[in-house]
Image (tube, rainbow, N blue to C red):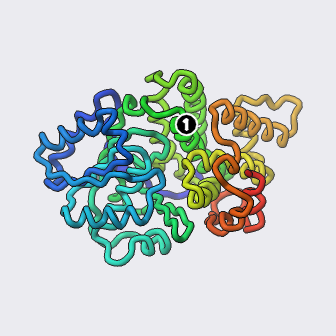
Amino acid sequence: MLGNFTYCNPTKLYFGKGAIKYLNDELPKYGKKVVLIYGGGSIKKNGIYDEVIDILKSNGKDVAEISGVMPNPTVVKLYEGMDIARRHGADLLLAVGGGSVCDYAKALAVSVHCEGDPWEKYYIRFEEPVCPVVPVGCVLTMVGTGSEMNAGSVITNHAQKLKIGHVFADESIMPRFSVLDPVYTLTLPHYQMVAGIYDIFSHICEQYFSGEDDNTSDYISEGLFRSLLTSSRIANTDMQNYEARSNIMWTATWALNTLVSRGKTTDWMVHMLGQAVGAYTDATHGMTLAAVSMAYYRHILPYGLKKFVRFAQNVWGVSPEGKSDEQIACEGLAAMESWMKELGLVMNLTDLGVTADMVEGIADSTLVMQGGYKVLDRAEIVEIIKASL
C-alpha cells in the first residue's frame, strides 16, 4: 500500500430476511417529518410500500411522498422533490428502491437547504454543501450501484445531454442506515438483475485497474470478483436462489462503499462513457457499461498489461504456461466477454439505441478521468465509442 488515505464509513447496515423491522430502531432517532421516496410503483405491487408505511405510521411519522423517481433521475425531478421536501419540512429522507432512488435521495439531501442551483453547484462545479444536509435512510430493493453505503449521486440533465456523478467528500451525505433484505430483490426481471450484476463487476474493475504496487485492496477485489462470478452464474439460471442473490447483494455493497478504492488512483472511464451514453438514450445503466467495456479494456490493455495478466490468472484462472503476457491478458478479457454473453448482457451500443450520428455528441459529453493506465484524448474516446457500436 503506497498511497496515503483517510477512511470513514458511518452507514449502519441491517442485512437479511425480515431486516425491515429494524426501521423501528432507526426512526425514533429523527424528527416527525419524513419524505418517502420511491420509483415507478413496483413497491406497491409487491407489498413493500405497505410494510414501510405501516412502520412509519406506528412510529408516529408525518409522511410526504415523492414517487416516480426514474432509473436515471433527472435534475427536473430533483427540483420537484426540493419543493416537496421544503414544504414538508423534511427531517428524514427515506429512499425505498434501487440505486437511482438512493442516488436521488442523496442529491435531494444536499439540495433542500441549498441556496442557488444545486445542478450548477454540485454537478458542474463539484462543490461540497455548506448548507444543512437532510439525513437519508435507504431500504434497498435492487442491487448494483452500492449507493446504499456511499456518498455518490448521479443526476441526468436532458437539456444539456449530461449525466454526471458527484461523490461527495462529506460522510454526512452517506445514508445514516440502510436496510438490505435479499428477498426484496427476488421479483426483479432478469434484465434488471443482470444489469445490476454488471454494474457491480464494473465498480470493482474501475478500482482494480489502477496502480502498480502490491495493494491489499486488489486482493479484496479479486475475492469480490470470484464471489460475484460464482453467484451470478447460479442466479442466472435460478433467479430465486436466495443464497446467490444474498451474496450478490453483499458484494454490491462492498464493491462501492469506498473500501477497495483505498490506496488506489482508480479508473472510472467505463462509467464516464456509459453515463454519456445514458444521457443520450436513458438506457439501463449496467447495460451502457457492458456495451462499452470490452472496447475500452482492450484499448488500455497495453498500458496496464501487468494488472491485466494478474486479472486473467487470479480471477479467470488462465494458465500462463507457454504464453506471453499479452496472450494471457487477452485470454482473460475473452473469458470476461464470454461470461458477459452468458449472462445475456447487451454487448453493443446499437442495441441500446445509439446511432452513428450520436457518436460525436456522446464523446463531447464524456468526462475524462485521470486515474487509470491511460488518460484518453477525444480521438480515443470517439474510437472506443465507434468500436462499441
Q: Residue furthest bottom?
A: 116
Question: Can you say whether 135 is above or below 190 in the image?
Answer: below
Tell me how many marks there are. Answer: 1
Question: What is the x, y in percent for residue 219?
Answer: 59, 39
Question: What is the x, y in percent for residue 344?
Answer: 64, 34
One can see residue 363 in this view: yes
Asked whether 384 or 28 is in front, the reply is: 384
**Lateral position of residue 10 relative to residue 312, left or right:** left
Question: Can you say whether 334 is above or below 363 in the image?
Answer: above
Question: What is the x, y in percent for residue 130?
Answer: 33, 73
Q: Specify few, some or many for label 1: CA neighbours under 10 Å numbering under 14, 14-19, or 20 or more.
A: some
Question: Can you say whether 54 is above or below 63 in the image?
Answer: above
Q: Amino acid at mark 1?
A: Tyr
One can see residue 215 in this view: no
**Lateral position of residue 360 relative to residue 102, left or right:** right
For image coordinates 17% across by 49% down, the residue present is 29
**Lateral position of residue 59 relative to residue 26, left or right:** left
For image coordinates 53% across by 46% down, the residue present is 260
User: Residue under circle 1?
Assistant: 191
Please identify the quarter of the rendering in which residue 373 is found: bottom right
For image coordinates 37% across by 44% down, the residue present is 97
Say what secondary structure mark 1 lies in: helix
For image coordinates 14% across by 43% down, the residue present is 57
Asked whether 199 or 15 is in front, the reply is: 199
Question: Can you say whether 112 is above or below 254 in the image?
Answer: below
